[in-house]
């Protein structure tokens, strides 16, 4: 495109001024038009001269364009490389952020579990605290009850101590009276034991010994004794002298049955003395055979029953 038209010195008007000043004579005018006075020509707007060759064919422009294209390509390549590095950095940062996110999620989950466990522990401790508080109140109530009971027991102990002291004093008086009576009874007991020929002694727990004398007219000092064991519901009897087998079972067993049936210890002792006397009589008669002895025993017991 040529711009030489703007450099012509013969031009006195511009296209804009020419358009403003152009009047169509065929257009009717309602007002009369008065033309302005003639004006001097305007100075040129651009004094630079332009070649007539197109810009696309200008070597300088082509050189500049090639250089600019190379710079642009280099800049684009650099930008692409920079964007690629930035993309890698962003991807690495995103991967690190994902890893950090997972770590934070795991830590958050762990913290949540720990918080849950802690809440459960706190709940258990609160329950235990409530239970301990309730037990404390219960223990305090029991302590007050125990204090009252202790006071009551202390009062009862004092009362029992008074009663015990009174009983001890009574027992002491009774012992003193018993000792006085025993001192009097000793000679009398010895007299009756000597005359009656019977002595009763305790030889162990729940065991009493009965000892007879004056049974054998040939020897009044000869001893006949038996022991009665009362430790069980049924009495048992063992012979002590003259020998454990002095009385035969046919004689001893009916007497023991009588004792357990009647609980008549006095009657049993009397029957035992008669059994010893019967055996002494058999000795005096000189009977040796066991059959003859048993027949004589039956005869003596029958005669005694008739009397």
Image (cartoon, helix red, strand yellow):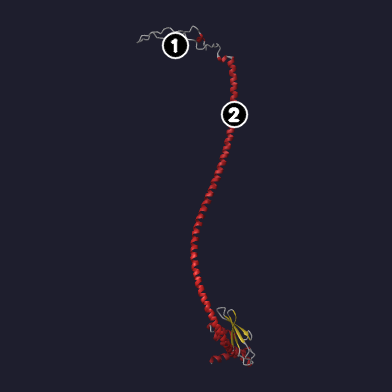
Whether residue 220 sits left or right of residue 31 in the image: it is right
Whichever of callouts 2 and 1 sits on the residue coming sooner in the sequence is 1
Q: How busy is the neighbourhood of tag 1: few (under 14 within 10 Å), some, or many (20 plus)? A: few
- The quarter of the picture where the C terminus appears is bottom right
Q: Is residue 257 visible?
A: no
Q: Residue at x 59, y 18 (%)?
A: 64
Q: Is residue 276 visible?
A: yes
Q: Nearer the viewer, residue 5 or 191?
A: 191
Residue at the spot 59% in from the left edge and 33% down from the top edge: 89
Please tell me the numbered disc located at residue 17: 1
Residue at 59 percent across and 24 percent down: it is 75
| Count of numbered labels shown in the rendering | 2
The location of residue 126, given as percent across then percent down, is 51, 53
Instruction: Assess disc 2: are there few (<14), some (14-19) or many (≥20) residues with their C-alpha within 10 Å of its C-alpha.
Output: few
The x, y position of residue 98, in whole percent, is: 57, 38
- Is 120 positioned to the left or the right of 289 in the image? left
Relative depth, front residue between 175 and 66 = 175
Q: In this picture, is 93 found above or below 298?
A: above
Q: Nearer the viewer, mark 2 or mark 1?
A: 1
Residue 223 appears in which quarter of the rendering?
bottom right
Measured as percent of width and height from the top left, residue 279 is found at 61, 89
Is residue 79 left or right of 34 when viewed as pictured?
right
Q: Nearer the viewer, residue 288 or 256?
A: 256
Helix, strand or loop under label 2: helix
Q: Which residue is drawn at the image coordinates 46% and 11% (left, top)? A: 15
The percent position of residue 19, horizontal first and vertical second, equals 43, 11
Q: Separation of disc 2 and disc 1 at Cα?
A: 55 Å
SS class, disc 1: helix
The residue beneath circle 2 is 82
């Amino acid at each position: 495109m040529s711009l030489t038209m703007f450099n012509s010195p013969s031009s006195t008007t511009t296209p804009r001024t020419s358009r403003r000043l152009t009047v169509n004579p065929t257009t009717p005018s309602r007002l009369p038009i008065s033309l302005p006075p003639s004006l001097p020509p305007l100075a040129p707007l651009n004094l630079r001269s332009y070649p007539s060759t197109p810009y696309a064919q200008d070597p300088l422009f082509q050189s500049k364009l090639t250089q600019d294209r190379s710079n642009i390509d280099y800049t684009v390549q650099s930008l692409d490389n920079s964007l690629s590095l930035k993309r890698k950095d962003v991807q690495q940062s995103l991967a690190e952020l994902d890893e950090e996110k997972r770590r934070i999620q795991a830590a958050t989950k762990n913290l949540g579990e720990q918080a849950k466990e802690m809440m459960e522990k706190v709940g258990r401790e609160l329950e235990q605290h409530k239970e301990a508080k309730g037990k404390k109140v219960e223990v305090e109530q029991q302590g007050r009850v125990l204090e009252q009971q202790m006071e009551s027991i202390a009062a009862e102990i004092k009362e029992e101590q008074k009663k015990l002291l009174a009983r001890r004093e009574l027992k002491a008086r009774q012992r003193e009276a018993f000792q006085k009576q025993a001192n009097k009874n000793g000679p009398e007991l010895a007299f009756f034991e000597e005359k009656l020929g019977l002595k009763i002694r305790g030889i162990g727990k729940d065991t009493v010994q009965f000892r007879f004398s004056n049974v054998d007219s040939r020897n009044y000092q000869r001893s006949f004794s038996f022991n009665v064991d009362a430790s069980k519901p049924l009495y048992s009897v063992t012979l002590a002298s003259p020998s454990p087998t002095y009385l035969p079972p046919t004689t001893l067993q009916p007497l023991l049955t009588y004792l357990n049936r009647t609980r008549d210890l006095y009657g049993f002792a009397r029957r035992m003395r008669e059994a010893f006397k019967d055996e002494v009589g058999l000795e005096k008669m000189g009977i040796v055979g066991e059959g003859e002895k048993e027949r004589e025993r039956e005869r003596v017991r029958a005669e005694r029953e008739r009397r």
